Image (cartoon, helix red, strand yellow):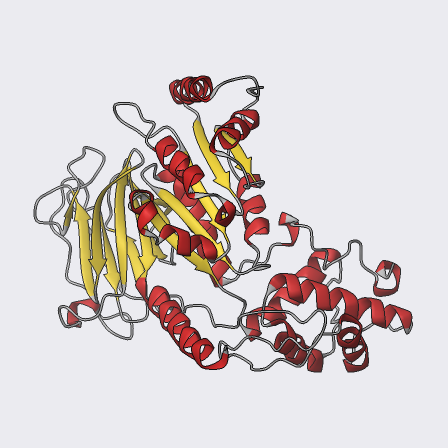
Amino acid sequence: MYLELFKLQELPFRLSPDPQFLYLSKQHARAKAYMESTIWFTDGFVVITGEIGAGKTTLIETFLRELQTDVVIAQINQTQLSPTAFLQTVLVQFGFSPFNMKKAEVLATLNQFLIEQYSAGRKVLLIIDEAQNLTNRVLEEVRLLSGLETTKDKVLRIILAGQPELNEKLNSQDLIQLTQRVRLRFHLTALTKTETIAYIDHRLEVAGSQGRRIFAEDTYATIYKYTGGVPRLINTLCDTCMMAAFAQNMDHVGTDSLQAAIRELQWAEPAGIGTGLRFSTGGAAAPAALMADPGAGGGDHAATTVLGDSMGGGGPAPLPHSGPVAAANLPPGGPVVGRVLLACEGKTVMERELRPGRLVIGRTPDNDIQIDSKFISRHHCQIVTQFDACVIEDLNSTNGIYVKSKRVRRHNLNDGDVVQVGQHEVMYLDERASRVRVSAEHVETEVMDKVEP
């Protein structure tokens, strides 16, 4: 192969879902955060959808690799199953041999296993990939599984991942009870042009390029044009490009190698770029990529510095002007910028919208969010929301706030971040990203209605 010519240690554009090569775009990072939230919160499903080749499986493999040892996992990839066969497959993942069991025995065994794992302090996670292939009857079994619980907690965490057709199923009237249990739902869109460039360079760096630019600068725009930012299509085209360069004994990919690869793949000229149009299907292997920019995330602006309180201190001090807009000077109300979910022991106990301004969390009733717990200071922390940024700050509390097990004084909140506050968790969701995504999908639908017969 071409590894020696390009001085690489591994093939950079294999189609297998290798977590080592995962590029975390804003979209992928958010989807991964939603998956991780299943470990914190036990109530409700998490649903991740995306176009074919968007990177869902690689994302799942990366998520699974990073899980702690106290999480017991069942991963289902073959989803064209009857209800009983599906339940048997779940039990097989947990180490049982249930093929001679009747459905009642399967359910009893599964229920007993889940209770035992809960009693032993272990979390049980069921991940179903390609869930769009599940029949409504099997999805109903999934819903019933989600209802297994002790007097305090659900005993099974569930992630459904699949193609966009999964959303269509979940939105049907037949599955309304299941849909009501969906806590978070996210659609993974294609990479932007900038992310496509970063994606290519990232995979080459992991493969051993050591910063060398293997693809010529003028090839990236064409690669994005023909792939629409879909990771699997990028891998296919880039690998073929490197094979074409190898055949010409070239240690870099230029426009000649790129055009040779496009001819070899028989990909037709895209019908549109960045407009939600599908590619034309003139070529035998023309990709059907959908192109849409992912939603924008929060900004990086600093907001405020506050003199806070301890367990015996006073209320939160006035906010000095230390950013582009002081939180104290922001008008009340305004558009919803984000939401916070407050959870304890895996259950969501409160949800609040975030508008420009300040939201204080503490033990006493004068706070915007009161947490009546001995682990919470009178005024424990605050969330300062601006139009372009959201920051959480510790107000000199006794027990502090933690992000990824690290105590922090202040933290710029990104979509999906989970902050530990005493024995509670605060999860931040950026509503601006959702609005941009919904708007893009609406425009895409309108364009498709006009273009497709």
Q: Quadrant of residue 413?
A: bottom left
Instruction: Find residue 399 and report its horizontal and vertical position in percent.
Output: 28, 38
Q: Nearer the viewer, residue 76 or 437?
A: 76
Q: In the image, is residue 313 above or below residue 254?
A: above
Instruction: Find residue 170 and report its horizontal and vertical position in percent.
Output: 37, 51
Q: Is residue 130 visible?
A: yes
Q: Nearer the viewer, residue 99 or 453?
A: 453
Q: Residue furthest left?
A: 365
Asked whether, in this view, residue 258 is left or right of residue 247, the answer is left
Q: Quadrant of residue 255?
A: bottom right
Instruction: Find residue 11 and report its horizontal and vertical position in percent.
Output: 77, 56
Residue at horizontal 12%, vertical 51%?
315
Q: Is residue 300 visible?
A: no
Q: In the image, is residue 17 above or below residue 356?
A: above
Instruction: Find residue 38 and report its horizontal and vertical position in percent.
Output: 40, 41
Asked whether, in this view, residue 22 is left or right of residue 417, the answer is right
Q: Residue furthest front?
A: 453
Residue at horizontal 87%, vertical 68%?
246
Residue at horizontal 87%, vertical 73%?
250
Asked whether, in this view, residue 155 is left or right of residue 369, the answer is right
Q: Quadrant of residue 158?
A: top left
